[in-house]
Image (cartoon, grey):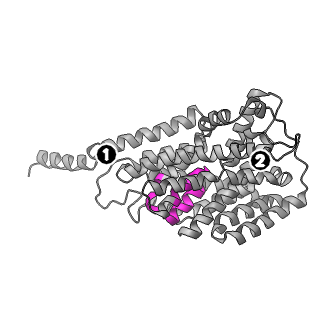
Amino acid sequence: MNFSSFLVENLQTFLTYTGFANLTTGHLVMIAVGLFFIYLAVAKEFEPMLLIPIGFGILIGNIPFKDAGLQLGIYEEGSVFNILYQGVTQGWYPPLIFLGIGAMTDFSALISNPKLMLIGAAAQFGIFGAYILALFCGFEPNQAGAIGIIGGADGPTAIFLSSKLAPDLMGAVAISAYSYMALVPVIQPPLMRLLTTKKERLIRMKPPRVVSQTEKILFPIFGLLLTCFLVPSGLPLLGMLFFGNLLKESGVTRRLAETARGPLIDTITILLGITVGASTQATQFLTLNSITIFALGALSFIIATSAGVLFVKFFNLFLKTGNKINPLIGNSGVSAVPDSARISQTVGLEYDPTNYLLMHAMGPNVAGVIGSAVAAGILLGFLG
């Protein structure tokens, strides 16, 4: 074999390993999705801390390559990405995310007005509504449970539950959950305006009472005991959530709380986002099931938002004038913290620039975090 033939043969072999030679239409579609996520994060500032890692992960996961035992892909056992992805598949990352959430969450609004917990509970109808819809669409009960949790608008909870109930659907469930979390400013305001009257939007709520430090310390302790005795299967998420909150409120573990809500949650968010994004390889992700899950996720989110708003309207029938709740905070029962609470504030200010609803909306918002974890525990207990 002469030198020129040798070069041509090696060049042809090299070309078969390039992404260009292995590119499919599916890869191009997913790359476009990844670029769209990054656009939403940069141009619209929709959940940039989540959408940039996930969007870039989608690009990583859809670089086409020839399967030649090089251990490159996230689904190839022993590859670097596969090892990092085990934090998702084994359910390690979500409890650590909940630890950080607990360490940065102030439950004062909920403690000062406990009835706001009911709004967070009402919003969980989105989860069980989507569960029923998924069953009608032909999914198995365990798959329907994993799909239903999208209605809580809680990415870590969705990942945790799907890793236990339906690992094969985890990529689609996670992407749907985070997508709708990011689209809170787009989806919720029209529903809130549609379901409320101008008079209801102008309701002023009493300022929340001042909560003592003792109450703040006792809340995570009693919260853990009450919720986990009721739903022990929610312990990984609820245990870490309340532990993180105790680190914050105790006043004597400031360094631990700062680590949990700072470097730790940032590191886990990066790893979770990039691996969830990379799990959307076109060959694994672009299926009819994924499209159906995305549609069901939208319906579950709409149900959750509507249930929260309508519940407040119903609850107001039993409250005296002066104690009524502004139904615009009903949307915040979904656990997209603090974005859905900010939407309550934004929409409320459109109709009365002096009516500040953010502090009130944070009550059902943090209740929604607890509620979605409890709902996940219930589904895991019945279906796991």
Residue furthest front as drawn:
317
Residue at x 56%, y 52% (from the top left corner): 150
Specify whether residue 348 is in view.
Answer: yes
Residue at x 28%, y 47% (from the top left corner): 22
Figure quadrant of residue 220: bottom right
Residue at x 42%, y 38% (from the top left corner): 32
Q: Count how many numbered circles sit on residues in the image.
A: 2
The residue that disc 2 covers is 315
Up/down of 7 relative to 73, above or below:
above
Residue 338, how many percent across, how many down? Answer: 70, 45
Figure quadrant of residue 341: top right
What amino acid is at disc 2?
Answer: Phe
Residue 101, how many percent across, how many down? Answer: 70, 55
Residue 208, how many percent across, how many down? Answer: 87, 46
Specify whether residue 271 is in view.
Answer: no
Residue 95 inside the magenta-drawn segment: no
10 Å neighbourhood of mark 1: few (<14), some, or many (≥20)?
A: some
Residues shaded magenta:
145-172
Badge 1 or badge 2: first in the primary sequence? 1
Q: CA distance from mark 1 to mark 2?
A: 58 Å
Q: Secondary structure at mark 1?
A: helix
Residue 146, how many percent across, how many down? Answer: 52, 59
Up/down of 176 relative to 255, above or below:
above
Residue at x 60%, y 51% (from the top left corner): 126
**Which numbered marker is on residue 19?**
1
